Image (tube, rainbow, N blue to C red):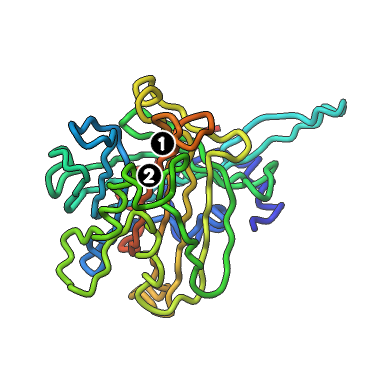
Amino acid sequence: MIAASRVTELKTEPRYIDIARQGDSDLDVLKLLPGTWKNDPGMKGRGWNAIALPFASSGSGIDYRLLVNQYDEVLKFTLVDKGVKNRGIQRNGTSINTDQVVVALDYEQRIEQLIADDFPASGLQGDPNTTIHHEPGLWLFMTNEAEKTSNIGRLGTIPHGDSLLALGAGEVTNGPPTIPAINGLPIGVNQTLTSPYLAPYNHFHLSPFKGVVADPNFPGFDPVEPHLLLVGGAPGTVTRTTKLQVSTTVETAGIVNIPFIVRQANAAEMISTFWIMELDELTPAGTPRLILQYLQIVLLDFFPRRDGLPGLIRWPHVSINTMEKVADADAMKTAAPATP
């Protein structure tokens, strides 16, 4: 936890932007993020994604398709913005200034699919080796005037027309993480996999998607239990784990979408968990080798529920990946000058 004396310094120091550096204590639980994470050759194709989408399929009686992707990713954390002041006063008649200081860390996420499949087959799954996601954003550490359960945040923007604020907290524990079990089935329908309406899920449950993996022992990606490929996925012995979990359902967080998205498949909620694992191996720089796993669920709302309750079916859009930190932040990127 950042010291109170350091918070006081950040309140009085000029705001400035600089290259982010791993281990910067001003970032608190975010301090291991700076640098470049990617699916290097030893972890190629460790990204997997499942999303249900509205789709008119003649004669099938199913009004959606289930799309699954195998992907590679590059996730960069490059600049830190320190001393971001949010001005305020105590509202108890004392008129004492209670400014909040935020430390922000920018990120850029790029995802390229290796291969994709869908059911029912649409012909719309996209070509191999094409970009399927780009997301610039910021991670925030609220150094003061924040709840312990929501002192970090993530701001993200997606070219489809979505903008999100997710709030949460981080914790550091010894040993590897515990990956929670996830039910990838839509909420608001009969959960029996053999029911006709869940035929796309049952299709990939019976024949999990293997992407470009040729190993006959590879179990494949099952969108019904999408967490399974994360379990035990770290290559080595994990000595310590930093868990970062944020959600758009916490306090003032939320998602805003353009009108078409709201009408067709409204991105209503998101919960995202990062596990940053320190291995018992050292890099050439003498620091622990770092592995990042994440599990992200975005709930898409479309079509009336089929269980007798009001509202729309909630379709989990699940993404998982396992990456390694491969480089420090780009020191060639020009830092902005200090500003008052």
> Is residue 106 something that shows in the picture?
no
- Front in this rendered view, residue 74 or 338: 74
Tell me: residue 210, above or below residue 232. above
SS label for mark 2: strand
Question: How far across and down, in percent of the image, does residue 245 sit?
Answer: 53, 52
Residue 154 % position (x, y): 49, 42
Position of residue 275 in the picture relative to residue 233 (left or right): right
Residue 257, image quadrant: top left
Residue named by callout 1: 300
- Residue 54 visible (yes or no): yes
Q: Residue at position x 25%, y 32% from top? A: 55
Q: Which mark is residue 317?
A: 2
Outermost residue toward the right?
93
- Mark 1 residue element: strand
Most foreground residue, 57 or 273: 57
Give me the C-alpha separation between circle 1 and circle 2.
7 Å
User: Quadrant of the rendered structure where residue 231 is?
Assistant: bottom left
Question: Is the C terminus in the top left, top right, bottom left or bottom right quadrant?
Answer: top right
Between 117 and 84, the one lying in front of the other is 117
Compared to 141, does 174 lie above or below?
A: below
- How far from the left and from the top, in percent, is residue 126? 15, 42
For marks 1 and 2 on the same chain, the one whose residue lies earlier in the sequence = 1
Q: In the rendered structure, are the residues bearing label 1 and label 2 in contact, judged by CB atoms less than 8 Å apart?
A: yes
The disc at residue 24 is: none
Which residue type carries mark 1? Leu
Q: Position of residue 71 (x, y in %)?
A: 24, 53
283 vs 211: above or below? below
| Amino acid at circle 2 | His
Which residue: 66% across, 48% down? Answer: 7
Please rate how many residues cluster around mark 1, counting C-alpha atoms within 10 Å: few if below 14, some from 14 to 19, many from 20.
many
